[in-house]
């Protein structure tokens, strides 16, 4: 059996490795700054758990391997400029935007994009990093070192944030999970809910958008698409050519997790439409020390990443998969007493959205 090498060895790489074990696939996540040659066979397969990486002997060898899956997608999506150009070329709705050139002025941007603008670094930004507001009312100015290195995007007054995780096989087969409703705090995903009956009306629209992207890129594997919902219209915020945080609920809430689906797709194994198991809630653990009592919460499965505890850092996640609303309420009430006050607003959001009908 060929090996699957993963560019990056964070929590996503670890979960891909675990998924590979049940599929009889040896998955090898790797440090991105390695300097020793790797014993890759010509028939081995390469994927990545991240879009951005430094130049090193390891990253160069992996990225240039003939079986690096979806090579073009990583080249395009890793740069917000070419990513936005891709959306425009495919006529996929996204926020109005403009490249931030060396000659751009605040006046020019306000005239084109309105008085509230988000500046986004072309590469390297995630979890709210690499972003900065440009507001006319606050007399904000463009950072000098961002010129030529960022895009400017009109701030969208969206109703909610949703995402779609799908996969494409080498044969062009497409499968999708149900839409996921997401809650962010300071640009970091805090919680997800899936599936929700009221989001079903947007499923076909989202699948058509993601299918267009994956087909154009000849993409193989799992790809995630984050969207703003504005009324009945979905607008793409960004896409990720990999397994994604908003798909973690599938580890307990579907017949096949996004990690197993990705390994199967890139390794040429059979790909089928996953079945969903009741309703799932995923909660990220941010900046908290390990708490053994999380395990005692009914219907909860805890995933701990064994990383150094830093403020705001994703250190693990908790999945709840429950059929009964009463059981779900009881589990959330118990969990609320085991998390910090920063989660209070998240619990309010969950309460408003779990059983909202429209």
Image (cartoon, rainbow, N blue to C red):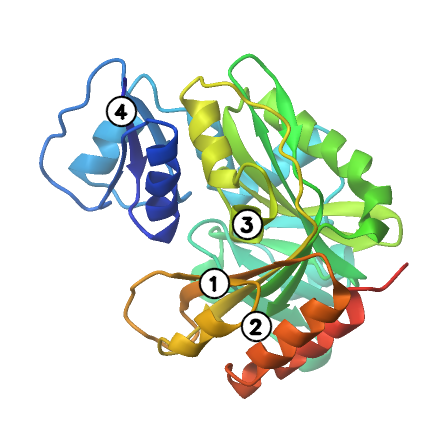
Q: Earlier in the sequence, mark 1 or mark 2?
A: 2
Residue 150 vertical position relative to residue 213 in the rendered view, above or below: below
Residue 200 drawn at (x, y percent): 82, 44
Report the residue marked by disc 2. Answer: 186
Residue 183 vertical position relative to residue 94 in the rendered view, above or below: below
Q: Nearer the viewer, mark 1 or mark 3?
A: 3
Distance from label 1 to label 3 (Cα)?
12 Å
Q: Earlier in the sequence, mark 4 or mark 1?
A: 4
Report the residue marked by disc 4. Answer: 3
Distance from label 3 to label 4 (Cα)?
26 Å
Most foreground residue, 356 or 66: 356
Residue 74 drawn at (x, y percent): 45, 34
Report the residue marked by disc 1. Answer: 317
Q: Earlier in the sequence, mark 1 or mark 3?
A: 3
Q: Classify mark 3: helix, strand or loop.
A: helix
- Residue at 62% x, 72% y is 331
- Residue at 54% x, 45% y is 80
Q: Residues within 10 Å of mark 2 (few under 14, many from 20)?
A: few
Q: Earlier in the sequence, mark 3 or mark 4?
A: 4
Report the residue marked by disc 3. Answer: 252
């Amino acid at each position: 059996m060929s090996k699957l090498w993963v560019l990056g060895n964070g929590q996503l790489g670890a979960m891909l490795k675990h998924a590979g074990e049940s599929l009889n696939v040896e998955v090898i996540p790797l440090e991105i700054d390695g300097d020793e040659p790797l014993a890759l066979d010509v028939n081995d397969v390469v994927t990545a758990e991240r879009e951005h990486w430094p130049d090193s002997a390891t990253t160069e060898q992996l990225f240039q391997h003939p079986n690096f899956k979806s090579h073009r997608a990583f080249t395009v999506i890793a740069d917000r400029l070419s990513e936005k150009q891709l959306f425009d070329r495919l006529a996929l709705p996204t926020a109005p935007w403009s490249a931030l050139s060396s000659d751009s002025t605040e006046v020019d941007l306000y005239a084109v994009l309105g008085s509230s603008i988000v500046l986004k670094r072309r590469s390297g930004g995630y979890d709210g990093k690499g972003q900065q507001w440009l507001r006319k009312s606050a007399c904000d100015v463009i950072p000098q070192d961002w010129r030529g290195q960022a895009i400017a995007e009109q701030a969208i007054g969206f109703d909610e944030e949703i995402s779609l995780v799908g996969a494409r096989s080498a044969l062009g087969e497409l499968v999708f999970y149900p839409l996921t409703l997401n809650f962010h705090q300071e640009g970091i995903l805090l919680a997800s809910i899936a599936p929700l009956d009221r989001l079903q009306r947007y499923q076909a629209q989202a699948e058509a958008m993601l299918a267009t992207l994956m087909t154009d890129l000849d993409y193989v594997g799992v790809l995630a698409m984050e969207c703003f919902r504005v009324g009945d219209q979905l607008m793409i915020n960004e896409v990720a050519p990999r397994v994604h945080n908003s798909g973690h609920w599938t580890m307990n809430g579907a017949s096949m997790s996004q990690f197993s689906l990705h390994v199967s797709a890139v390794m040429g194994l059979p790909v089928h439409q996953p079945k969903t198991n009741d309703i799932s809630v995923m909660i990220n653990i941010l900046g908290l020390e390990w708490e053994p009592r999380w395990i005692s919460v009914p219907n909860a499965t805890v995933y701990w990443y064994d990383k150094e505890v830093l403020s705001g850092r994703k250190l693990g996640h908790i999945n709840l998969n429950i059929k009964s609303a009463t059981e779900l309420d009881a589990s959330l009430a118990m969990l609320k007493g085991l998390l910090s006050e920063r989660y209070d607003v998240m619990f309010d959001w969950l309460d408003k959205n779990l059983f909202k009908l429209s």
